[in-house]
Image: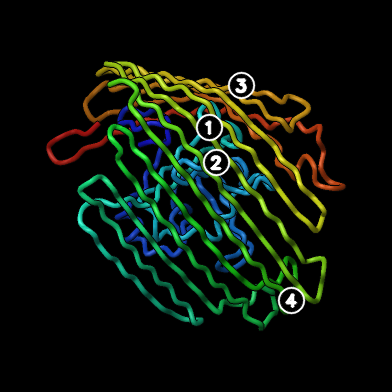
Amino acid sequence: VVTAGRIAEDPARISADITIIGEDEIKKSQASTVVELLRRQAGINTSSTGGPGQSTSLYMRGGNSGHVLVLIDGVRVGAPSTGAFDWGLMSPEDIERIEIVRGPQSSLYGADVMSGVIQIFTKTGEGKTSLRIHGEGGGQASSRGSMQVSGSTENGISYALTAAGQRTDGVSVAASGTERDPYQQSQLSSRIGMDLGDATIEFTARQSVGKNSLDGGWVLSDTLNWSASSRQSIYSLEVSYPILDQWESSLQLSRSADDVTGYDPGNAANNSDIHTTIKQINWQNHIDLADFSLLFGLDYHADRAINPLAPFNKVLKQSAGFTSLSWHSDLLDLNGSLRHDRNSGLINSANKSTWHAGAVLHPLQGVKISGNYGTGFKAPSINDLYWPTAGNPNLKPETSRGWDTAIAYAYAGDQLQG
């Protein structure tokens, strides 16, 4: 499990409340969207403004949609304008696994992790070249298909390329409407890794595009000819290198974007043209000794939101330093983390420090008792601070404190499992 501590760890020694959705479970679910997978998990609720492709929000442990950080292969995604991620375009064809970590995790990831973090890992290639083709169809002229090629070479190059799409004629969102609101979506993704001596280089690219018709909120009859186009994209380059036998350093440069354009020839008030980007630099170091593990690093991201119709063009910059330490023994595992964030856009309480502490006790084989306490915060979004007539640049960050305890007992065959 990577997300709970930003490094690979044994789930039995992790104190955080975690859930892992693996590739086999994703395939067996036959889910057409990632939201279908996530809404089945404990402590998670979702809501949508309509049918396929409509704006979809996720809520964890009672927080709002902006209190959950979403990562894709380590890259922060979402719209800085609203401070939340729209799940409407996220389909599962290129996903290898999903890790869910509940509770405040700002001490490792910074702002927007008051309720938890969800990280999606896209597929990697290994072994001989394989080809997978999938297609299905159903009512309302619905269809869905994907094709994936993956594998690796003897000289240390791995690759996974995926193309997928879906469409439906849909139904009318309006209460008494008769005009169907169709939706179509396409997705392209690639993940390529390369070994260069002791170093590892990985490049990730992902783009999802959707177009749907809208009826708007609280309407009783159809809104004709109103359509919206959305695009989410991610580009990432990560380099990992072992400085010493027990010390590995990694640097990730990435960019994510979320664009939404709406057009209604009958009502100009429904038109929209919003473009947001998050440019990120993440540098972290992991020192792994006999019973101790030390992690430290720096994070930086610049968030931009542009709306030519407002007009509106604002940038927020956030930088942070973080460190975490864990200690392991046969009976007890302890972990703690500390982080300090600086945000350029906040006049009041611009800097924020957060921390987390956790413990795992193994009193008997197969028994795991865990506890956590941590703090989190959410910085105001760009819209909260600067939107014309509604923004307030004097807003302070939201803060949270969270704790949980758990006891788990696992039994498999004749052996108790930790």
Element under disc 1: helix
Q: Secondary structure at mark 3?
A: strand
User: How would you rate the neighbour count of disc 1 (Cα within 10 Å): few for under 14, some for 14-19, many for 20 or more?
Assistant: many
Q: Residue at x 29, y 50 (%)?
A: 158
Q: Is residue 336 left or right of residue 407?
A: right
Q: Kindly indicate whether the residue at mark 1 contacts the one at mark 2 (C-beta within 8 angstroms).
A: yes
Question: Which residue appears at 59% of the width and 51% of the height?
Answer: 257
Image position, residue 380 (x, y; %) = 71, 37
Q: Give the residue displayed 32% in from the left and 70% down from the top.
A: 133
Q: Secondary structure at mark 4?
A: loop
Quick one: which residue is furthest to the right in this view?
389
The alpha-carbon separation of the residues under discs 4 and 1 comes to: 42 Å
Q: Which residue is mark 3?
A: 353
Please give the residue where the numbered disc 4 appears in the rendered image: 223
The residue singled out by tag 2 in the image is 69
Q: Is residue 247 left or right of residue 230?
A: left
Mark 4 → mark 2, Cα distance in angstroms = 34 Å
Give the SS element for disc 2. Answer: strand
User: Can residue 35 be seen at all in this image of the molecule?
Assistant: yes
